[in-house]
Image (cartoon, helix red, strand yellow):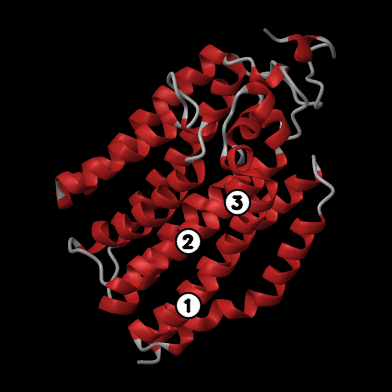
Amino acid sequence: MRPAAQAAGGMGASGIAPNSWRAWLMASRPPSLFVAVSPVLLAVALVYERTGTIDVASALLALAASVVIQIISNLQNDVGYTVRGAEQRGNRKGLPRATALGLLGVAQVRRAIGLLIGLALLLGLPLIAERGWPVLAMGLASIAAALAYMGGPRPIAYTALGETFVFLFFGIVAVVGTDYVLTGVLPPPSTWVAAIALGALSAAALNVNNVRDAAHDADVGRRTFAVVFGAALARRFYALGLALPFALLLALAWLEGAPLLLAPLVLAPAVATLWRDFCRCPGGLAFNDILVRTFAMELKFAALLALGALATRWLA
C-alpha cells in the first residue's frame, strides 16, 4: 500500500523517498523526543543536588531507554493509525504519517518496533541487575503503555485518558523512576513535585495534538479529551498544563531550601506568549507550530530547573 510514494515516481508526496532515513525520521518524530529527554535530565540534576554524586553509566542507560521507548510509541502511533484506516477518513490536520503515505511498510515498522523493544530491555538489564524488580516493572509498564497508546482492541489514543497516561509515564514514572535508578531509594517529596511539573507540560503537549485533531478524531471514533469534553475545556486544560509547573516551582524551592530552583520563572513571558498564540491559533496545521513550541518549552523548563539544581549544589 504505497500509492503516495508511487505517484511521484518513487518519491512520496512529501518529497521523501520510501524507506529512506528521512522516512524513518518522519515516523520517529524527533521533536517529541524532548518529552523523553527532559524528565531524565531533570532527575539526574536533582539527584546530584541532593547527593553530590551521579552514576554516569546508569544515567546514560536511563536516558537511552527513555528515548527508545518514546520512539517505540511514535512508531506504534504511526503504524497503528494507518492499520485502522483512520488516516484515510475525515480531514486530518496532524503531522504526516510515514506508513499512511506509503514511505514505510507496516510490516517493516512492526519489525523495527520489535527490535527497539529488545534494545530497550537490553539497555535496562544493568539497571535491573543493580536495582531489582521495581526497575523491571517500570520498564515493562512503560513499554506496554507505548504499545497500547495506538495498539490493541481499545487503544489509549481512542479514549479521554491519553493526557493522563502521558502525565504518569513522562512525568511521575520518568522522573521518580530515574531518581530511583540512580539512588536505589524512594525519592523525597521535592522529586515528586518536579515529576508533576514535567508531567503537566507533557500532557499539555498531547492536549495541543488532540485539540488540533478534534473534528477528525470525532469522525473516526476517537473519544479523546478534546472530543469528549469539548474545545473550551480542552483549552483550559492546556492553560493548566502550562501554568501548574510554574506554580509548583514555589513549593519545590521551599522544600529544597533552594531559591535557584526558581530559575524557570524566566520563561514566564514566553509561556504567556505561547498561551496567547494557542488561543488565537486559526486551527488545523497552524497547531503544529504550537505543538513543537510546547515540546521545546518543556525541555527549556527542565533544563533551567536542572541548572538551578546544579548551581545550588555548586554554591553550597
Q: Quadrant of residue 225?
A: top right
Residue at screen point 40% across, 62% down: 195
Q: Which mark is residue 249?
A: 1
With 309 as the anchor, is 240 left or right in this view? Answer: right
Mark positioned earlier in the residue sequence (3 or 1): 3
The one nearer the camera, 228 or 42, is 228
Residue at screen point 65% across, 44% down: 230
Residue 290, image x, y percentages: 72, 53
The extreme bottom residue here reads 316
Q: CA distance from mark 2 to mark 1?
A: 11 Å
Look at label 3 and name its amino acid: Ala
The one nearer the camera, 203 or 23, is 203
Q: How many other residues sit within 10 Å of disc 2, few (<14), some (14-19) or many (≥20)? A: many
Q: Quadrant of residue 284?
A: top right
Look at label 2 and name its amino acid: Leu
Mark positioned earlier in the residue sequence (2 or 1): 2
Q: Which mark is residue 198?
A: 2
Location of mark 3 (residue): 205
Q: Is residue 130 visible?
A: yes
